[in-house]
Amino acid sequence: MEIVVSGIRPTGNLHLGNYFGALSNFLKMQQSHRCFFFIADYHSLTTHPTPADLHGNVKQVLVEYLASGIDPEKATLYIQSDLPETAELYLLLNMNAYMGELERVTTFKEKARSQPENINAGLLTYPSLMAADIIIHKAQKVPVGKDQEQHLELTRTFARRFNRMYNHDFFPEPTAYNFGEDLVKIPGLDGSGKMGKSEGEGNAIFLADDPKVIRKKVMRAVTDTGPTTPNQPMTEGVANLFSLMRIMSKPDTVDHFLTEYNGCTIRYGDLKKQLAEDIVNFTAPIRERIQELAADEKYLSQVVKTGAEKAHESAGKTISEVREIIGFRKF
């Protein structure tokens, strides 16, 4: 059974793009792989969150993971900072990571340009921490987006370097888990690109959004003045709404509005109202589950405790063997 590792930074609520994208595949993977899913609170420190924000955001991601269907009985779900072995391996990997290779990472260069007042060491060594997250469990597969592929390649580099330096075939070289056609891309509401937190609150429908917020966001979605000739090509904003409708609505609903569009009789307000209600109906059970879980501190505490214990079992074995290989000995 292949080992899969993936983490998410606690920087905000999960949205429909997360749910139908990587998260829906995590739900499948936990049935057939040995999965480690963690909340990357160490990683979030590069942006200097306040203590209250950090704890609240960690809890929110934990609750939304569980509400979406991540099963702590099937997968290991834990908080990154509950696993001190990760921090130790991060330190050890940094001893053999070179400034030049870290400074060449595209995301580091971009962030250094956009936030020159906050070029901290954690930002520079972000790939080392990501590598520690992955190889602490000796993972073979890692679900990553395009922006993380270079980090994964560095993880492979660090694994090879460790094996070569200490003459042990110890760490496997993890490869990207490519969802391919299984990865559904959810468009945003702003008329371009994909749904995402970084694009602004109005661009994304969050799993925890209440019905009033969902309706308001959808009604503000970008459209145009309407088609003037039959079967006119759609502008990007309109095409995005139809893409969302194909995922959220019944086929006959989609066909109805397509017929109206192609016949130049469509009223975008009617389409948006229908789409908003379909999204409200879809997210209602998830939102209710989020509210139930958020109030059940005892259950959340047990999930986190069990996850930490299962993660320790894997990571403790790895770090013990790493110490032996490097040459640390007890007197």
Image (cartoon, grey):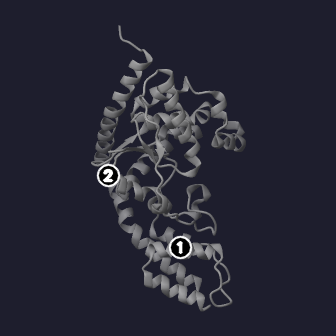
Residue furthest toward the top? 331
Residue 164 left/right relative to 34: right
Front in this rendered view, residue 285 or 129 = 129
CA gap between label 2 and label 1 equals: 30 Å
Secondary structure beneath dot 1 equals helix
Labelled disc at residue 243 = 1
Mark 1 is surrounded, within 10 Å at the Cα level, by few (under 14), some (14 to 19) or many (20 or more) other residues, namely some
Q: Position of residue 256 (x, y in %)?
A: 49, 87
Figure quadrant of the N terminus: top left
- What type is the residue that disc 2 sits on? Ser
Residue 84 occupies quadrant: top left
In the image, residue 77 above or below residue 81: below
Front in this rendered view, residue 46 or 96 = 96
Q: Visible in this render: residue 295?
A: no
Tag 1 or tag 2, which sits nearer the N-term?
2
Residue at 59% across, 41% down = 47
